[in-house]
Amino acid sequence: MAKRVSVDRWLFTVTLLLVFVGLVMVFSASAVIAKERYGSGYTFLTRQLACGLGGIVAMVIAMRVDYRRYKQPAVVFSILGVTTLMLISVFFLDRSHHTHRWIHWGFFSFQPSELAKPALILFLAYFLDLRGNTMSDYRGTLLPAVTPTLIFLALIVFQPDLGTAIACAAITGCMLFVAGMELKYLGYGLLVSILPLYFLIFHVAYRRARILAFLNPYADPQGNGFHII
């Protein structure tokens, strides 16, 4: 009989707490706009609550599955492949708010770049477990490990969604470091990313405005700096 996998109750509780805090923040930020547009201040809260409940159900189902089943190559590469196809498919769909980020199915909207995060975690956990003793092998381990991340980063940046791209890069860096990668490789990665980040941030007007508002919110207290103040 398969051994039952125990549940981390603290992690489960913290997850529920984060969902609750997120709901409060969504309601606080959207109540007035929802009232003006739809006649009810609870419109966006209701949508977020439905998504939150769906996520909790999915989490509970995932908790019931022995994590060792996710080590199957068919599972890992199927999820990686589906995620890649979905990231590509958004470029052939209608733009939403001048971006190619969303897939819309009726009242349901889905952002494939969010699936990239767990897909990368699953792939890296699988791959680095196989190559755990060769973390100094640049060509045999590190380059194959970061290749899916680089593909995802390119697709996500062109959507454009720089925040999610940075999150994916950070996830990859953290997992490689925990797996035993030498710090010098992490330093090389940071050095290589400086120039692209500079152009992606300071040569794009709205991103530059956000950074400047964060550094000096009182320069535009009624505009970009309002929420920071």
Image (spheres, rainbow, N blue to C red):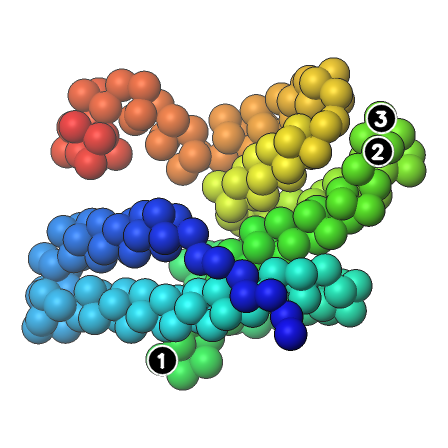
Q: Nearer the viewer, residue 134 or 214?
A: 134
Residue positioned 58% across, 39% down in the render = 171
Residue positioned 69% across, 48% down in the render = 125
Residue positioned 14% across, 51% down in the render = 28
Q: Which residue is mark 1?
A: 107
Give the number of the disc on residue 133: 2
Question: Residue 140, located in which quarter of the rendered image?
Answer: top right
Question: Residue 213, located in which quarter of the rendered image?
Answer: top left
- Cα distance, mark 1 to mark 3? 48 Å
Q: Earlier in the sequence, mark 1 or mark 3?
A: 1
Query: What percent of the width, then of the height, locates residue 63?
Result: 48, 65
When the figure is inspected, residue 115 is found, relative to residue 203, above or below; the finding is below
- Dot 1 and dot 2 residues touching (CB under 8 Å): no
Describe residue 32's horizontal placement relative to residue 171 as left or right. left
Residue positioned 48% across, 41% down in the render = 163
Q: Earlier in the sequence, mark 1 or mark 2?
A: 1
Query: What percent of the width, then of the height, locates residue 183?
Result: 70, 18
Secondary element under disc 3, as helix, strand or loop, is loop
- Which residue extends farthest front? 1
Query: What percent of the width, then of the height, locates residue 13?
Result: 31, 52
Describe residue 120's horizontal placement relative to residue 27 as left or right. right
What's the amino acid at mark 3?
Ser
Secondary element under disc 1, as helix, strand or loop, is loop
What's the amino acid at mark 2?
Asn
Give the number of the disc on residue 122: none
Q: Is residue 164 visible?
A: yes
- Check the picture and name the quadrant holding the N terminus: bottom right
Mark 3 or mark 2, which is nearer to you? 2
Q: Which residue is mark 3?
A: 136
